[in-house]
Amino acid sequence: MLDFDNLPLKLAPRLQEKFPDINFVIADPNENLEPVNKELILIDTIEDAKSARGGPALGGNVIMIDDIEKIQTQKLYSLHDFDLAFNLKLLQKIGKLDKVQILGVPMKGDEEKILEQIIVELNRI
């Protein structure tokens, strides 16, 4: 895990403490994601994203992405290019995923502010 990409991992223990009834699973998004009742809620680091609730992800803000079609996939040249977007679209295509909500965490920003924003978004779900 790269330093610029690990904020969700760093915040996971505090989120588990705040939401003891939620089972936070640390998973590689390129491996087997297991939807529950054809639904996934993910917390992941994002770059250059626009919020489903409107506007770009500015100033270190957490955004909600709930439309798989708005997630860009990379060109696949080998299995090394297999990414989260491709995985989600594949799960949807084979009927294992109906709904996804991705809490997009910025690569840079104030950890406390980002944690509070994640808490607010999780309370909305």
Image: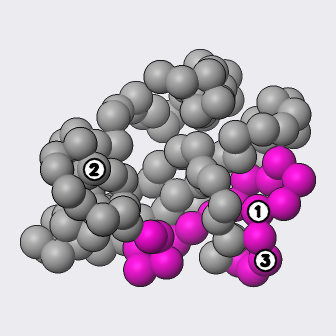
Magenta segment includes 31:
no
Residue 79: image location, x then y, percent: 16, 46
Q: Mark 2 vs mark 1: give the one in front.
A: 2
Occupied quadrant, residue 64: bottom right
Q: Amino acid at mark 3?
A: Gly
In the image, what residue occupies the spot 37% across and 67% down? 73
Return the residue at label 1.
57
Report the disc number at residue 18: none
Q: Which residue is the extreme one toward the front?
A: 77
Q: Is residue 37 visible?
A: no
**Label 2–label 1 contact, CB within 8 A:** no
> Residue flagged by tag 2: what amino acid is it?
Asp
Give the residue at x 87% y 34%. 110
Give the labeled residue for mark 3. 55
Q: State the SS at label 1.
A: loop
- The residue that label 2 is drawn on is 81
Given residues 24 and 65, the one toward you in this image is 65
Residue 38 placement: quadrant: bottom left
Which span of residues is magenta-colored?
A: 53-72
Asked if the residue under mark 3 is in contact with the one under mark 2, i.e. CB atoms within 8 Å, the reply is no
Gap in Å between the C-alphas at discs 2 and 1? 25 Å
Query: Marks 1 and 3, Cα distance to the nearest angstrom?
Result: 7 Å
Tell me which residue sits at (41%, 80%) in the image: 69
**What percent of the width, then of the height, locates residue 95?**
14, 73
Disc 2 element:
helix
Q: Amino acid at mark 1?
A: Ala
